[in-house]
Image (cartoon, grey):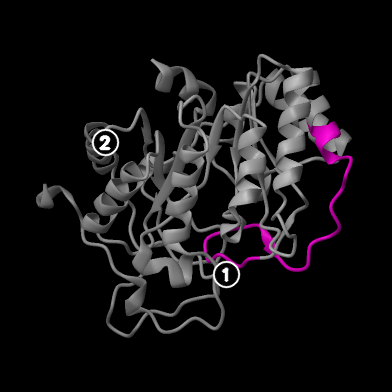
Amino acid sequence: MSDQITKSYSPLELQPYSRPGGPARPVTGEPAAVERKPPWLTVKWQQGENYRDLKGLMRDSGLHTVCEEAHCPNISECWEHRTATFLIMGDTCTRSCGFCAIKTGRPAAIDKGEPERVARAIEKLQLKHAVITSVNRDELEDGGAEVFAELIRRTREYVPECGIEVLIPDFKGVWWALQRVMDARPSILNHNIESVPRLYYIVRPQAKYERSLELLQQARNMNPDGTIYTKSGLMLGLGEEWDEVVQVLHDLRAHSVDIITIGQYLRPSFRHLPVMKYYTPAEFKMLKEMAQEMGFKHVESGPLVRSSYHAHEQVQQASA
């Protein structure tokens, strides 16, 4: 196995950052970052009728999508499948993760009409599967949990056949806030682990690895019959070692996670963390096979996989 895995370089080999997510300078003599993208990261762009419909409605309704805000490479493919990831509670995050393209700052007040508008947009577009995520709103007592819950309830009322996945923040470990979301009965409860614990201080400086694992376990405990699937995502290429990736997969499975997505980190801009390694399709295939052997009900693993990639298929395949 080791012969198939190319060397990666740890961000610990870099000089300190001026701020989380700021530019890094390689130590002299150390090949720290890899800027040239390999050929397997080429994306086939699709702009059919579904894509144009979704884009027009987003603009007309004043809605945000993480597909656009996070520069997702799969936006055209997902929108053509009538799957969209809505970004609620504004476009400004209270955290400063080193990988994320969403801006950091002081968010605006919560828009109480947003759940209604998003639910009506889901109805109008006749979406098969809607993914709902948010910026972190750490200034709120419940972290925005009630906004998630209200949007789930309204979507269930207007489009009962639509699958609903929520990609939630960690709510700073406030489990009664998580209970509000679970009580609204999403199809999938998603919280991304993102990286290995050793790199959290630069990748997710305001988060805690153990807290994210506990959230996923708490979600399972609040849903003992397993009818709400739990899900998490991991991105590679930030300087993690192979054994660390495997350990994260074991940790997620030990905390009752059903669905896992594994993808390549792509640098949004030179202000963000550099890419330390591009994993090959063969390596992603190996990780998929390992995760399946661990007992995950569904695994998406590939260079262009993102948290919502093929989300419309995951409930059915996990059930099967």
178 and 88: which one is in front? 178
Q: Quadrant of residue 262?
A: top left
Q: Above or below — where is 305 with respect to 243? A: above
Q: Residue at x 30, y 46 (%)?
A: 249
Counting from the top left corner in percent of width and height, residue 13 is at 32, 78
So how many labels did they put on this image? 2
Residue 159 among those drawn in magenta: no
Please indicate whether residue 271 sits to the left or right of residue 263 in the image: right
Q: Are marks 1 and 2 in contact (CB under 8 Å)?
A: no
Please indicate whether residue 239 sits to the left or right of residue 202 in the image: left
Q: Above or below — where is 287 with respect to 239? A: above
Counting from the top left corner in percent of width and height, residue 168 is at 60, 46
Mark 2 — residue?
285
SS class, disc 1: loop
Q: Nearer the viewer, mark 1 or mark 2?
A: 2
162 and 50: which one is in front? 162
Three-letter residue code for mark 1? Arg
Q: Residue at x 80, y 40 (%)?
A: 63
Please indicate whether residue 204 sits to the left or right of residue 171 in the image: left
Q: Is residue 67 visible?
A: no
Residue 271's mark? 1
Question: Mark 2: few, some, or many residues within 10 Å (few <14, many ≥20)?
Answer: some
SS class, disc 2: helix
Residue 113 among those drawn in magenta: yes
- What stretch of residues is rendered in magenta? 95-118
Q: Quadrant of residue 54?
A: top right
